[in-house]
Amino acid sequence: MSERAYSLEKRVSMTAKKASTLAYKKELNDKRAFICCDENCQIGLTCSNWGVLNGKKYYFRPSSNDELHIVGCTQISSDEEKAQIEQEKSCAKTTINKSGIIKMTKSINKARTDIGVHQEDENVPVNNLRKRVDGKSAGIGRESRNLYSLASFVDLYNDAEINHINKIIMVDSELLSLNELFVDLQSKVELDKNRIFYGKATISTGFREGMLQIDFVNRGNLRVYSNIDAVTKRSNGKIVKKYLDKNQEVHVYIRGKIISDGLREKFVPYNDSVYKDLYCVE
């Protein structure tokens, strides 16, 4: 739940309580005429307790259950992000239980985050068969669902109820199991393949001001860089702040490719920015 949103009617940012008060005064007409204040997100929002003066709680929520804040939105609260991750995971599990597939999807700025159900085309492998009117077997298209958040994938990976061997994750037109998607950085790594890598690391200030540096334990030739401000102003940034320059190890997940320049390994994020593909767990 977001505290503030941009009013399409007034063309200014305001709190949910202010919006409700203006609705009570008939100065605002549509509780759904709001968008997220993050210029890279801007999903449609709906105001709670519309037109109520003495409500217990005022907030903005996504107008659609299938449309979530983009990964790394600066306006989403920690509680809402947790709820959003749980919603993504829950929907993904429903699709998996129907023998469907989960598509790892990039979070593109100002693009709609769609976690609704889709029907896959004929090129996607199918597991189920049904009988046609003529008695012959015909394939049933597999249900699919987009999944954006790295944290949601981590939750799926840590869920003992999900089969980690079945190929249920679509990444770059390649169907993978959870065990294939997640790669321990202490093991052998296949280069130039989008995967989710994990391992213990230390977090420090980089060689120039404003740079975040991540060094993985037992993998000295891999170093990941990001912008400190971009990472720490997101909700997961609290852990980064806690371990920054403390020389203490923390569990880190990164999503993207590892390539080699001949001397060192280089990390290339799956999305357009490292902070969207970085997740720390104590």
Image (cartoon, rainbow, N blue to C red):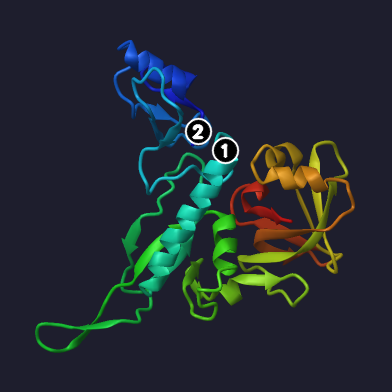
Residue receiving disc 2: 2
- Looking at the picture, which amino acid does disc 1 mark? Ser
In this picture, is 74 found above or below 194? Answer: above
Q: Residue 79: x percent and y percent?
A: 56, 42
Mark 2 secondary-structure assignment: loop
Q: Identify which residue is drawn at 51% across, 78% down.
A: 163
Asked which quadrant contains residue 135, the reply is bottom left
Mark 1 secondary-structure assignment: loop
Q: Is residue 107 visible?
A: no
Asked which quadrant contains residue 229, the reply is top right
In this picture, is 126 found above or below 157? Answer: below
Q: Residue 160: x percent and y percent?
A: 56, 73
In this picture, is 210 found above or below 277? Answer: above
Labels 2 and 1 touching (C-beta < 8 A): yes
Quadrant showing the C terminus: bottom right
Q: CA distance from mark 2 to mark 1?
A: 6 Å
Residue receiving disc 1: 77
Q: Identify which residue is drawn at 67% across, 50% down.
A: 274
